[in-house]
């Protein structure tokens, strides 16, 4: 079955798209017609190849999204290649468990920088291009953990709570320029990052509490992200959608 070309003619930047959620999002947006720029801390040749395999242009830039100079350089490379950017998917992040008494200020700041500061930096890099064209979509990855009682995640939940607040504020600031800003909150999922940080029995336990009783996988959020990054989202902004199998209800 052919995929509707809802993103034809658009250029999308996806952070952390070397694997997992990011790769699944990048490939799906490409199937829907978008050209893709990947920003990842590591090389992302497999994602680029997957995008090119469906007939779209792709490039990858190795950058640390928590560092201002690195993001600025990545932004310059992408805008030089594609001239403009229409869609930004802020997927890059980490999901580390650590007991509160083992979290010093340096580690706290590291998690905020990776999960929250990065989204500010990329928005600053690419929102001007969207403003100039009068159209844009920003989708930030949050977390359904904000609605759960999970131990050893205070630092992580603080960063993701900041993502929700940033999404709401930025939606107001950018609405006059035709730019919508929303967030998607996935569940603990069987992605490379999820399986590296969460024990298999815990993932199974999370799935058992969901309305849809199966483990989450990377492809489970691509439909929501695709909607929020399309023209269909023109009147939806400032929202956080739980794409988590019905675990958290807001």
Image (cartoon, grey):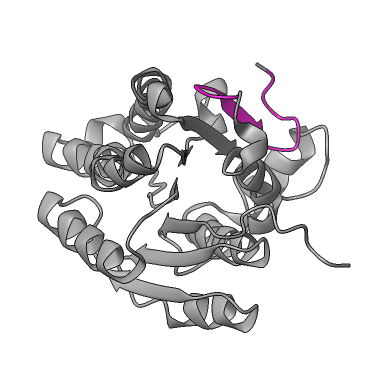
User: Residue 215: x, y in percent?
Assistant: 73, 50
Q: Residue at x 31, y 46 (%)?
A: 129
Q: Relative to residue 61, is residue 230 depicted above or below?
A: above
Q: Residue at x 62, y 51 (%)?
A: 189
Please provide the residue range marked out in magenta. Answer: 236-249
Residue 123 highlighted magenta (yes or no): no
Residue visible at 49% across and 22% down? Answer: 238
Question: Quick check: can you spot residue 148?
Answer: no
On-image quarter of the N terminus: bottom right
Depth check: give the residue in front, 231 or 219: 231
Q: What kind of secondary structure does the magenta stretch mostly adopt?
A: loop
Residue 17 spot, x, y in % from top left:
46, 63
Callout count: 0
Tell me the quarter of the picture where residue 188 sits: top right
Magenta stretch contains residue 247: yes
* Left or right of 170, for residue 245: right
- Report x, y in % for residue 18: 44, 69
| The one of 109 and 138 positioned closer to us in this rendering | 138
Which residue sits at x=71%, y=29%? Answer: 247
State whether residue 45 appears in this view. yes
Percent of width and height locating residue 22: 51, 59
Q: Which sits in the foreground, 146 or 99?
A: 146
Furthest toward the right, the residue is 1
Q: Is residue 144 above or below residue 176?
A: below
Q: Residue furthest front?
A: 133
In this view, 237 is above or below 75? above
Left or right: 7 in relation to 192: right
- Quadrant where the image shows the C terminus: top right
Q: Using residue 85 as the reference point, say whether residue 229 is left or right of it.
A: right
């Amino acid at each position: 079955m052919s995929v509707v070309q809802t993103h034809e003619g658009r250029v999308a930047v996806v952070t952390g798209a070397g694997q997992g959620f990011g790769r699944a999002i990048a490939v799906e947006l490409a199937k829907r017609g978008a050209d893709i720029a990947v920003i990842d801390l590591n090389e992302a040749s497999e994602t680029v190849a997957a995008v090119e395999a469906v007939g779209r242009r792709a490039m990858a830039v190795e950058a640390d999204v928590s560092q201002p100079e690195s993001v600025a350089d990545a932004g310059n490379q992408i805008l030089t290649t594609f001239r403009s950017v229409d869609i930004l998917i802020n997927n890059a992040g980490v999901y580390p468990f650590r007991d509160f008494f083992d979290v010093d200020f340096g580690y706290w700041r590291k998690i905020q920088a990776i999960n929250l500061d990065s989204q500010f930096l990329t928005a600053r890099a690419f929102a001007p291009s969207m403003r100039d064209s009068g159209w844009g979509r920003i989708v930030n990855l949050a977390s359904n953990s904000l609605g759960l009682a999970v131990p050893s995640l205070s630092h992580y939940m603080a960063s993701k709570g900041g993502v929700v607040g940033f999404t709401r504020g930025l939606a107001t600031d950018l609405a006059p320029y035709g730019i919508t800003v929303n967030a998607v909150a996935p569940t603990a999922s069987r992605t490379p990052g999820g399986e590296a940080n969460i024990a298999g029995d815990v993932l199974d336990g999370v799935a058992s509490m969901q309305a849809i009783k199966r483990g989450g996988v990377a492809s489970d959020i691509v439909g929501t992200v695709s909607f929020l990054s399309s023209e269909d989202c023109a009147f939806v902004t400032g929202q956080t959608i739980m794409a988590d199998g019905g675990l958290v209800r807001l």
